[in-house]
Image (cartoon, rainbow, N blue to C red):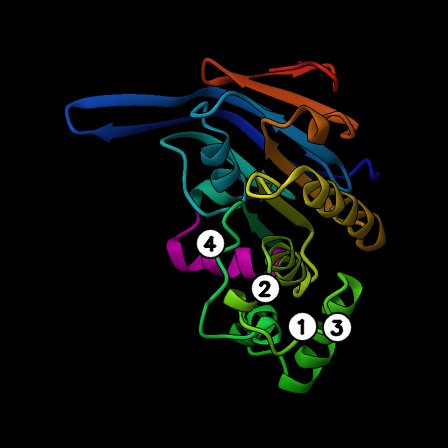
Amino acid sequence: MSNEQLLHATSLKKTYQIGKRRLEVLQGVDLKVNAGEFVALRGASGAGKSTLLHLLGGLDKPDEGEIKFRNRPLHWMATNELALFRGRNVGFIFQSYHLLQEFDALENVCLSARIRRRPANEVRKQATELLERVGLDHRLDHRPNELSGGEQQRVAIARALINEPALIVADEPTGNLDSKTGGEILDLLCSLREEHKTTLIIATHDSSVAGIAPRVVQLADGKLAATPPDLSP
């Protein structure tokens, strides 16, 4: 792990208006993450884990507070600037995979790199290598509905790595999988993080996921607190 600070979030607040109700999800979150760290974010369902990941990855903006990525202020960026930032720096892995059903595995992995106008041959070669690395060299031309949940998540992992991001944010990446498949996905993520020297932040309620993370933070009452890696929710 590097001593370089990758992310620095200060006093993050986020509120949603649901009908007549104001839901204060984040109420002053402070977090620092160094390059190369593996951080598990824990909290009860509805605690705001996904909201915090979306802010850290530039998918959304806080109502108050600051987020800096290598000292670049994300909270001031315009929507198009944030889109460029995400494409170059962040890989996302979601619980529900979010693969495009009309594309096969190889096309799904290539898509974000092609959006960045990278050369087609270069992208296809890299995507093929990534799918081989996640054990799907025999599934390149299969569409999502022809893949198991674990295989779809492997495609999503390869897609997250295609642009060689400095940061991967994973939102309950094993939540839709059985324990055996979930363990395999987690092992794969950890191996790829080491290989690519990538920073990894995983939001999870699974104690087995948090148990292998060198650093665990707990989200409760809209704020973060450091917790032992083996602490149950």
Residue stretch rendered in magenta on the structure: 77-89
Q: Is residue 195 above or below residue 163?
A: above
Rendered residue at 22%/29% (across/down): 18
Q: Is residue 85 above or below residue 221?
A: below
Name the side, left or right, on which 79 lies relative to 88.
left
Kind of element beneath mark 2:
loop
Q: Give the labeled residue for mark 3.
A: 137
Kind of element beneath mark 3:
loop
Counting residues from the start of the chain, the first of labels 4 and 2 encountered is: 4
Residue type beneath disc 1: Arg
- Measured in 3D between alpha carbons, the distance from the residue under mark 3 to the one under mark 2, in whole angstroms, is 13 Å
Whole-percent x, y for residue 145 in the image? 50, 66
Rendered residue at 57%/51% (across/down): 92
Q: Residues within 10 Å of mark 4 (few under 14, many from 20)?
A: some
Q: Quadrant of residue 61?
A: top left
Judged by its main secondary structure, the magenta piece is helix
Whole-percent x, y for residue 19 in the image? 16, 29
Q: Give the labeled residue for mark 2.
A: 147
Q: Give the labeled residue for mark 4.
A: 82
- Measured in 3D between alpha carbons, the distance from the residue under mark 4 to the one under mark 3, in whole angstroms, is 33 Å
The foreground one among 133 and 117 is 133
Counting residues from the start of the chain, the first of labels 1 and 2 encountered is: 1
Mark 1 and mark 2 residues within 8 Å of each other at the beta carbon = yes
- Measured in 3D between alpha carbons, the distance from the residue under mark 4 to the one under mark 2, in whole angstroms, is 32 Å
Magenta stretch contains residue 81: yes
Q: Give the labeled residue for mark 1.
A: 139
Residue type beneath disc 4: Leu
The foreground one among 97 and 17 is 97
